[in-house]
Amino acid sequence: MFEDVLSFINRHNSFILTTHDSPDADGLGSQIVIGAILKKMGKVFKIINSEPVPTNLKFLKDTEIIETWEPEKHSSFLADSAVMILDTSDEYHIGSIRTALGKAKETFYFDHHEPGQRSELSGFLDSEAASTAELAIELACSAGVELDPHSATAGYAGIVHDSGFFAYPKTRIRTFKAAIKTLEWGADPNYIYRELMESASYSSILLQKHALSNMEFHADKRIAFLILRKEDFEITGADFEDAENIVNIPLRAKEVEISMMIKEKPTGEIRCSLRSKGKVNVSKIAQEFGGGGHVTAAGFKSLLSTEEILKKLLASVKARIDGE
């Protein structure tokens, strides 16, 4: 199954591991697991992302080795290395480090998302897997590598993040098998749950309050949308990463089939998160805006105004709901 991945690893001695911008538990978890595999195989590697590790994920012990891309600092290492992109198959989703890919010896992706439309890179994609961390654990087993507890913790965190703690549609027997393997290697499910789900900042709770107070519904309550403007982050003191899970809240209502949230970054960039209960493929909607993801969870970023995005997004979602 992983012949191409292992062949890629065996072709090189030095690697840079990167993931999509706004790194999440699956992207970071798979980086840490793959890094542990490379170390056991006698390889040299650096984990370098376009954006820093979110504060809420710094409980993963090995995140201190994750660096933020600096061309002057990292270009010399890049020239002697192969790049492995984790948790996305689209180089347009990895941020500023994308401009350096042509200088690497080879670039290879390792991913579980629905296939994108723009990427011309080669790599390994299994969209049946619930997470990239799940694939990384399977790769470790295939390579005969046993992980240390810290790497196992990162792997488990990635699995539960992208499987919704084993509740999302892609959760399969293999998902549980990968998770069990991390427990055998020392992962602590209760600790990881508390860090992911019960360690939010006071500011993030205030941010939820702002988002929900302005929530609107459309299409006979089948569509819910929320907007978080720059001012909301300033007033509450919340970080941009604190908004990550708010988009899931409206799906608790029986009537809501799709939830979407528009977030304004201080830089002016807009990011949109889409969630679905499965009747509508939000990955297809995100692809219309240059993004991607899964059937039930997707997103994109844009330089359009919030009002322009909202108008176009509502039209696209309504058309898909009406076409059911």
Image (tube, rainbow, N blue to C red):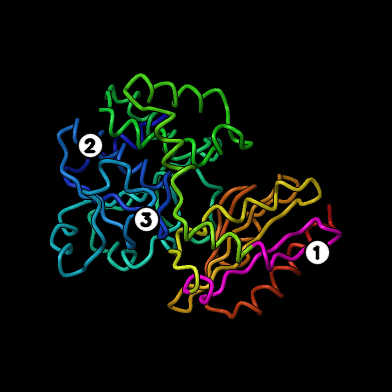
Residue 7, quarter of picture: top left
- Alpha-carbon distance for marks 3 and 1? 33 Å
- Magenta part of the protein: which range? 212-234
Indicate the position of residue 148 as horizontal and vertical percent values.
25, 28
Say what amino acid the circle numbered 2 marks: Leu
Q: Tell me the crowding category of disc 3: few under 14, some 14 to 19, or many 20 or more residues within 10 angstroms, Cα based.
A: some
Indicate the position of residue 97 as horizontal and vertical percent values.
31, 64
Indicate the position of residue 272 as horizontal and vertical percent values.
58, 64
Indicate the position of residue 303 as horizontal and vertical percent values.
52, 78
Element on which disc 3 rests: loop
User: Which residue is pictured at 41% across the width and 33% down the height?
Assistant: 156
**Which residue does the numbered mark 3 point to in the structure image?**
54
Say what amino acid the circle numbered 3 marks: Pro
Q: Toward the viewer: 222 or 175? A: 222
**Which residue does the numbered mark 1 point to in the structure image?**
218
**Which residue does the numbered mark 2 point to in the structure image?**
38
Q: Tell me the crowding category of disc 1: few under 14, some 14 to 19, or many 20 or more residues within 10 angstroms, Cα based.
A: few
**Residue 40 as seen in the image, left or right of residue 159:** left
